[in-house]
Amino acid sequence: MTEQASRPFLYVVVCAAGVARDVGTLITAAQERGWEVGVIATPLALRFLDTAAVEAQTGRPIRSAWRLPGDPRPFPDPDAVVVAPATFNTLNKWAAGISDTLALGTLCEAYGLGVPIAVLPCVNEALAAHPAYRAGLERLSGMGVRFADPYAGNAGEGGTHPAFGWERVLELLPPRM
Ligand SMILES: Cc1cc2nc3c(=O)[nH]c(=O)nc-3n(C[C@H](O)[C@H](O)[C@H](O)COP(=O)(O)O)c2cc1C
């Protein structure tokens, strides 16, 4: 078995929030913890990413659309899934069981397959106040999905924004998968 094949496989689902441009930080942190990484981006998130840099870092194409029937599966099955940054839109649709992007289909299915899922929401306080969002988080938590404290992006004193803290989502996964 090659070193690459022996490592557990992590799907990193990326949604269309501004911080997505820095997802390389999460990929590096996951690789340092022994994960093989494949990135699944929502269609809109592709516009936020340096796709060439992400593909060079993971050694795999970013997935965003479903493959055609008969095409080979580009990624192995996941041992775990993280969603970072997770948008209001994708979280609400996932909780409702909507599967109109590959990212959502992957998340909906991962639950049924019993794959551990950890989420780092990037949702501001105004959006987070919506009752559908709060009900959705409750539903997903009840499904066993683990959530890091949401990043609301509020500027601190002096107008500086806090760090996104990408590694927090990895710490929610079961130990040494
Ligand atoms: C520059 C920019 C930054 C955005 N940041 C966020 C964000 O932090 N959180 C969020 O929920 N939506 C954010 N949005 C809105 C989402 O991109 C929008 O809701 C989109 O439909 C999400 O699609 P997705 O969930 O399929 O990735 C942002 C939009 C833009 C243009």
Image (cartoon, helix red, strand yellow):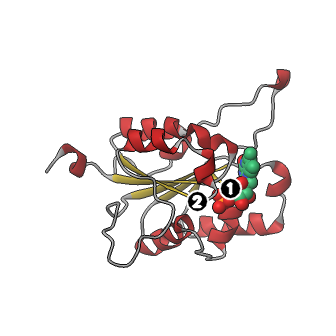
Figure check: 129 above or below 111: above
Farthest residue to the top: give it. 158
Residue 88 seen from this side: no
Note whether ligand 1 is within 8 Å of mark 1. yes
Label 1 belongs to which residue? 87
Q: Residue at position x 68%, y 56% from top?
A: 87
Q: Please say if the residues under marks 1 and 2 sit with CB atoms less than 8 Å apart.
A: yes
Left or right, 77 with reference to 98: left
Of residues 92 and 65, the one drawn nearer to the viewer in this rendering = 65
| Percent of width and height locating residue 152 | 75, 44
Which amino acid is tagged 2? Answer: Thr
> Residue at 61% across / 77% down in the picture?
97
Q: Residue at x 46, y 42 (%)?
A: 52
Residue position for label 2: 42
Hey, what amino acid is under mark 1? Thr
Which element type, helix, strand or loop, lies under badge 1? loop
Residue 39 seen in the figure: yes
Q: Tell me the distance, in whole angstroms, between the alpha carbons under discs 1 and 2.
A: 10 Å
